[in-house]
Image (cartoon, helix red, strand yellow):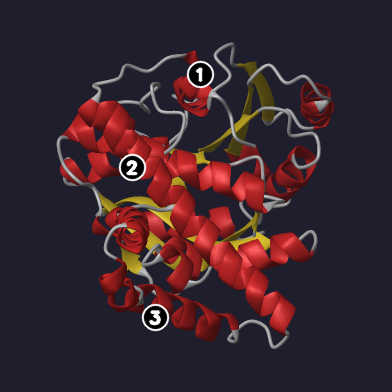
Amino acid sequence: MEQKVAIVIPCRNEEQYISKCLHSLVNQTYPLHLLKIIVVDGQSTDNTKMIVSEWSKKYSEIILLENIHKTTPYALNIGIQNAKDCDLIMILGAHAELDTTYIQFAVEIMKNNPAISCVGGVLKSISENHTTDVISKAMSSPFGVGNAYFRTGLSEGFVDTVAFGLYRSEVFNYVGLFDEELVRNQDDEFNYRILKKGFKIFLSRKLAATYYVRTSFKNLFRQFYQYGYWKVYVNKKHRTITTLRQLVPFLFVMYLFFLFIALVVFSSTFIFLLIPLLIYIIVAISVSFQYYSNILNNVQLVWAFFVLHISYGLGYAKGILDFYVLSKKMNKKDEKLSR
């Protein structure tokens, strides 16, 4: 039995990337007539809407919808609500391109494994320049992102989350839609609810997608700061820590804070307390030599690791302060986009 697949793409000001994304979809090995490509635009101020409109004139499978709220979870929900005629629903980023066999293999995995409710693949980062090459290596390294296997590609099997997952449509009937309060981490939070309901998420190394990473360390910092910040909000909402790996950057930041206090107040113990930081630096340098043999490149990669960990940890600490200590409510400032 043929299965119709919807691909929901939230986007805003993506004129540089949206055509590449759509090109990868219309050239899938899966039959094009079985695809429904839903682009949900968050009131772009560049040429994104015009570009998508041109694509939709050429391919009736491409539909352009409006997202007046601008943020990702609203876009996802708009797309899902317009995909009720589809058997499977995929969430895709406008910065991504799918390998040509991605959807075909994903559908086959779902057909052959009824116990799987969501399947996703491995992210391969695209390097546009030297900085993005360094960032992409940091984001695909276990030292950089821990056991986020959809980034490292080191393992496949049942996992707690995937990027660009393909879901059975009935999952949304049982679990609901994406949390519209979340600017970040809405996919992680949704996948957490899936697991709580007893559904299973599978990561397959047979599926691969390429992704354009942030183009500067500043943008990388903002991205992972928000990841850490909103993870705390998710934890508070569900009254649990959803994954243990999220605590590591926060503990690292707390360690650095107490190291500074020791330097100022307890100078006699500073050298002893410095040992973990020295170990961190030694490990980071050692890992960097797995990717580069040039000293300057090694230093930049070590810096990228540091930015990843510090930004997430600081965001997490700020989230604890705002959502637990101050019981802060969200406002429009919190919804600032970080691309």
Question: What residue is shown with label 3?
Answer: 279
Is 153 displayed left or right of 161 in the figure? right
Image quarter for residue 156?
bottom left
Query: Which kind of residue does numbered mark 2 sit on?
Result: Ala
Give how far across and how far down residue 324 sits, in percent.
Answer: 22, 30
Residue type at mark 1 is: Lys
Looking at the rendered image, the disc whose residue lies closer to the viewer, 1 or 3, is: 3
Viewer-closest of 206 and 28: 206
Characterize the local packing of mark 3: few (<14), some (14-19) or many (20 or more) Cα atoms within 10 angstroms.
few
138 left or right, relative to 81: right
For residue 271, side relative to residue 11 (left or right)? left
Q: Is residue 27 visible?
A: yes
For the residue pair 122 and 313, the one nearer the viewer reads as: 313
For the residues labelled 3 and 2, the Cα–Cα distance comes to 23 Å
- Residue that mark 2 sits on: 317
- Residue 200 higher or lower than 79, as above or below: below
Task: Determine whether the residue tagged by mark 1 lies in a helix, strand or loop.
Answer: helix
Instruction: Give how far apart the Cα atoms at labels 1 and 3 are.
Output: 38 Å
Please name whichever residue, 312 or 48, is drawn nearer the observer in this view of the structure. 312
What percent of the width, then of the height, locates residue 1? 44, 46
Question: Residue 124, labelled with which disc?
Answer: none
- Secondary structure category for the residue under label 2: helix
Q: Earlier in the sequence, mark 3 or mark 2?
A: 3
Q: Quadrant of the C terminus?
A: top right
Number of callouts: 3
Please tell me whether mark 3 sits on a helix, a strand or a loop: helix
Residue named by callout 1: 333
Q: Residue at x 81, y 40 (%)?
A: 16
Three-letter code for the amino acid on which mark 3 is drawn: Ile
